[in-house]
Image (tube, rainbow, N blue to C red):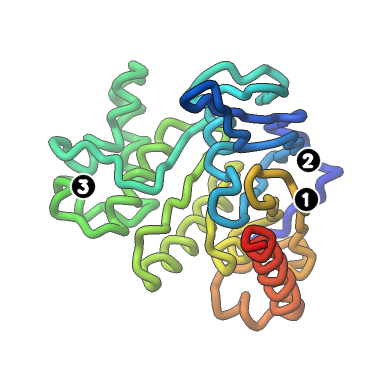
Amino acid sequence: MSTRRSEAQRRSKLVLEHVSKEYQLKRNETLLAVSDVSLEVFDNEVCVLLGPSGCGKTTVLHMMAGLVDPTTGLLSFNDKEIVGPSRERGMVFQSYTSFPWLTVEENVEYGLRLNKVPEKERRERVDFFINKVKLARFRKAYPKHLSGGMKQRVAIARMLANSPEISLMDEPFGALDAETRWHMQELLLDIIDETQMTVVLVTHDISEALFLADRIVFLSRHPGRIREILSMEFKAGRRIPSKEELLETPGYLEIERKILHMMREEASDVEQ
């Protein structure tokens, strides 16, 4: 895996400034889901949002995607305010989102057709990303013939084929079995290194966060606030290619223990 530039050498890609989200409930009641979140996501960074259940991780991600408007604060991408969804911000959901009536290659091609990408370029992009996610043998198959991991690879290939500048992923591997999940995590790191894309990923899995992240943004219990931003200093500026090597890297157990302690503290606060 390649050595990465320091934060000082990279430019901000996505910026959140004092962002809060309040939902309107029945009987004029409101629910504050996210409170005063300020964050920069850097070019070619894997930024992971982690925290206890209900802390607003997905709400933050959906605001980044333009699917949810903030109640207060400002979100910007490439110095332009986010006011809705955009091709430059790709989204992968936890649930499988393939169209069941389309084959693998037709699913991957779908967004390109909508955006009127010329046929030759469409074919080149579809071929490249189907090969990249290792689905070439299944390109003519329909989603009902695929395993869960394959369906999620289709979703990732479809998002990447549209060449977004940033990929927003909402627990993309959460529904997979353990073996498939870590294979998919390793595949994602390979794609990130090859395409140099920027990723914001939501997870509840501490080991997944530590494996994938360049930085972990740890959110407190509801309403979600940034409790701490953790730099993966034990990785020494590189991405570690396998789970085995990660577990053997000095410093891994210490930061895992720290995050487990923060999770326990947040849970204790709820119980009191």
Q: Is residue 166 above or below residue 144?
A: above
Which element is circle 1 on? loop
Amino acid type at circle 1 is Arg
Instruction: Name the N-terminal-most of marks 2 and 1.
Output: 1
Image quadrant containing the C terminus: bottom right
The location of residue 70, given as percent across then percent down, is 62, 24
Which element is circle 3 on? loop
Query: Looking at the image, which residue sits at the far bottom?
Result: 248
Q: CA distance from mark 3 to mark 2?
A: 37 Å
Asked if residue 88 can be seen in this view, the reply is no
The residue indicated by pointer 1 is 5
Q: Residue at x 61, y 42 (%)?
A: 198
Instruction: Give the numbered dot on residue 10.
Output: 2
The location of residue 6, given as percent across then percent down, is 81, 50
Mark 2: few/some/many CA within 10 Å (<14, 14-19, 20+) = some
The location of residue 239, given as percent across then percent down, is 65, 62
Amino acid type at circle 3 is Arg
Q: How many marks?
A: 3
Instruction: Name the N-terminal-most of marks 1 and 3.
Output: 1
Q: CA distance from mark 1 to mark 3?
A: 36 Å
Q: Is residue 231 above or below residue 158?
A: below
Q: Are marks 2 and 1 in contact (CB under 8 Å)?
A: yes
The residue indicated by pointer 3 is 139
Q: Residue at x 65, y 83 (%)?
A: 248
Instruction: Give the numbered dot on residue 211.
Output: none
Residue 216: name its quadrant.
bottom right
Q: Is residue 138 left or right of residue 95?
A: left
Mark 3: few/some/many CA within 10 Å (<14, 14-19, 20+) = some
Amino acid type at circle 2 is Arg
